Image (tube, rainbow, N blue to C red):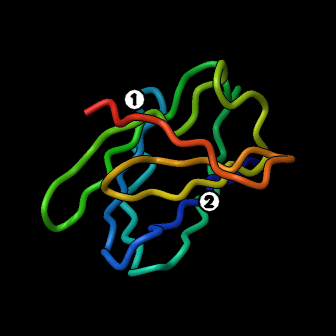
């Protein structure tokens, strides 16, 4: 069992749609300043990336929320998602590491 923990990090509502291979992992709506846990149960997690689209009222971005080469084995991946950038808190770190959006 693997968990993807996504927080909005802003006062904006966030719509999240993720895909793993050709499987739609569902649409999730995260309220303002809330956190949503996605219980992702997929076979061989790490073999394929998990791709997500994040949408706000005034736009959207896409990002690989899980990639084995970047995230390694991840029992709980913790992310703060804002319109400016996606940031992850890696195990053992006290500060988030931020990345650029794909789109």
Mark 2 neighbour density, 10 Å: few (under 14) some (14–19) many (20 or more)? some
Image quarter where the C terminus lies is top left
Q: Residue furthest front?
A: 95
Image coords of residue 86 (percent x, y): 46, 47
From the viewer's side, name the closer residue of 92 and 47: 92
Image coords of residue 100 (percent x, y): 40, 34
From the viewer's side, name the closer residue of 18 and 76: 76
Label placed on residue 5: 2
Image coords of residue 60 (percent x, y): 21, 50
Residue plotted at (39% across, 80% down): 31
Task: Please tell me whether mark 2 sits on a helix, a strand or a loop.
Answer: strand
In the picture, residue 27 is in which quadrant?
bottom left
The residue mark sitting in front, 2 or 1, is: 2
Task: Please tell me whether mark 1 sits on a helix, a strand or a loop.
Answer: loop
Is 71 drawn above or below residue 92 in the view shown? above
Label placed on residue 22: 1
Image coords of residue 6 (percent x, y): 54, 60
From the viewer's side, name the closer residue of 69 and 90: 90
Chain-order first, disc 2 or disc 1: 2
Describe residue 35's horizontal placement relative to residue 76 as left or right. Answer: left
Is 42 drawn above or below residue 44 in the view shown? below
Residue plotted at (80% across, 48% down): 93
In the picture, residue 68 is in which quadrant?
top right
Mark 1 neighbour density, 10 Å: few (under 14) some (14–19) many (20 or more)? few
Residue plotted at (79% across, 32% down): 73
Residue plotted at (74% across, 27% down): 72
From the viewer's side, name the closer residue of 41 and 52: 52
């Amino acid at each position: 069992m693997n968990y993807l923990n996504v927080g909005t990090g802003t006062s904006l509502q966030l719509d999240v749609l993720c895909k793993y291979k050709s499987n739609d992992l569902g649409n999730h709506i995260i309220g303002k300043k809330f956190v949503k846990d996605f219980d992702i149960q997929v076979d061989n997690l790490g073999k394929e990336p998990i791709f997500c689209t994040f949408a706000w009222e005034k736009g959207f971005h896409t990002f690989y929320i899980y990639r084995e080469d970047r995230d390694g084995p991840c029992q709980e991946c913790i992310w703060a998602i804002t319109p400016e950038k996606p940031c992850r808190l890696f195990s053992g770190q006290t500060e988030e590491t931020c990345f650029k959006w794909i789109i």
